[in-house]
Amino acid sequence: MRILPFDYAIRNLGRSPLRLAMSVVGSMLVVMLMIAATAFVRGMEKSLADSGSDRNVILLGAGSEESIERSEIKASVPTQAAASLRGVRSTLGQTFISSEIHMALTVGTTRDEQSKAQVVVRGVDLPAFLVHPQVRITQGRSMNPGANEIIVGKLAATRLGMDDAQLALGKTIWFDDIQWTIVGRFTAPNTVMDAEIWVPLNDLKVSAKRDTISCAVLTLDDDGEFEDVAAFVASRVDLELVAVRESEYYAKLVAFYRPVRVMIWVTVALIALGGILGGLNTMYAAFAARVREVGMLQSLGFARRAIILSFMQEAALASMAGALIAAAASLVLLDGVAIRFSMGAFGLQLDAIALAIGLLTGMTLGVIGALPPAVRCLRLPITEALKAA
């Protein structure tokens, strides 16, 4: 089978600048949407997956395995666990057990003006920085107990719908009818903690008027086993505890948000289908004026498969040009953009997989968009094709 020269498809792209522009722009929009959707899903999954460690175990109140915010346990549990368990990591006499309170609170810049969104406020002690090594203070310092001081995550402003300058060092915010001063900024990349506000544990106890904590998070050393923690929980029925691996807890959250991811993919698929149909209309209009050209190519001895291949090359070039523009624009405009969800926020994850899916989508648009109109034009007998206007 004789194949049409590749430069024939390239020269044909310039025959109709308007059609070329429509094909490139249409492909760019569909591919950019696909890249954004993939980055959204991967950002959400990575944020939840990286929040948990296989070596960390969470002690929760029985019946609250799916929500730390609903959990309540006695404040003495961390001390009792440290005294009873072997295999808990420690350094220089400091045991890696973090007593924590997790609360969803409405935050405002003044007492009367409250944000419409809620943010997770986490009450912690110093061991929290050992148990959660992802957290790094980037500005200022850690908070001092009893001084109404807090530190805020990098994405906390996004979560609250505020300007980042409103949560700068030295600024004050209100929650629980108390004014708090921001003394530090921290980051915990690709984790839910990046959108939280951290408060000294005892200060949050006082402001929330509670004497219980939400959970205790402990880190096992190389010899520690989860089964030992499970045995401790089973032996202390009076404490009404349940032990959950931190990685498993966040894996359940990933599963919980599966319907959201499915909805996003369905939406993108429908829009992509609309883009393909729009591309088909453009191709049909373009190829309808080239029926005589198709007949002439056949009369010169080129097989129908060779003509279809040339048209597919032409459409794929236009679509891939749009896909490359979309990939470049996405890297500039979308990479790392913060998105709010549920009680947290995460950044779009524009990695190699997201870009590969986008480029593959562009190639698919070109192939699918060219095939049906090319086949339709080739159905005409050569004599009728040569007589076409």
Image: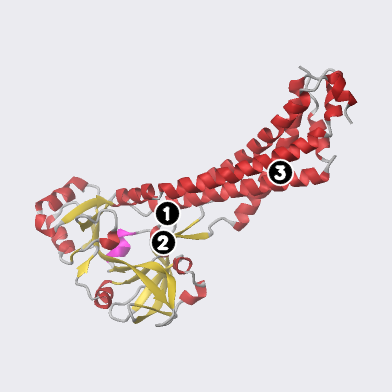
Q: Whole-Å distance between the Cαs marked 1 and 2?
A: 10 Å
The amino acid at mark 3 is: Ala
Q: Is residue 225 visible?
A: no
Q: Which residue is mark 2?
A: 344
Question: Image point 57% across, 44% down: which residue?
Answer: 270
Nearer to us: label 3 or label 2: 2
Identify the mark nearer the N-term, 1 or 2: 1
x and y, in percent, of residue 236 in the image: 10, 55
Say few, some or many: other residues with alpha carbon within 10 Å of mark 2 (under 14 / 14 to 19 / 20 or more).
many
Tell me, yes or no, whether the highlighted magenta stretch contains residue 316.
Answer: no
Question: Image point 43% across, 50% down: which residue?
Answer: 46
> Can you tell which quarter of the image residue 319 is in?
top right
Image-based side of 374 in relation to 192, left or right: right
Q: Which residue is mark 1?
A: 47
Identify the mark nearer the N-term, 3 or 1: 1
Q: Are marks 1 and 2 in contact (CB under 8 Å)?
A: yes
The amino acid at mark 2 is: Gly
Image-based side of 259 in relation to 250, left or right: right
Q: Whole-Å distance between the Cαs marked 3 and 1?
A: 32 Å
Q: Could you say which is closer to the camera, residue 162 or residue 296?
A: 296
Nearer to us: label 1 or label 2: 2
Q: Could you say which is closer to the camera, residue 28 or residue 136?
A: 28
Magenta-drawn segment: 127-132
Q: Main secondary structure of the magenta part?
A: helix
Q: Which residue is mark 3?
A: 321
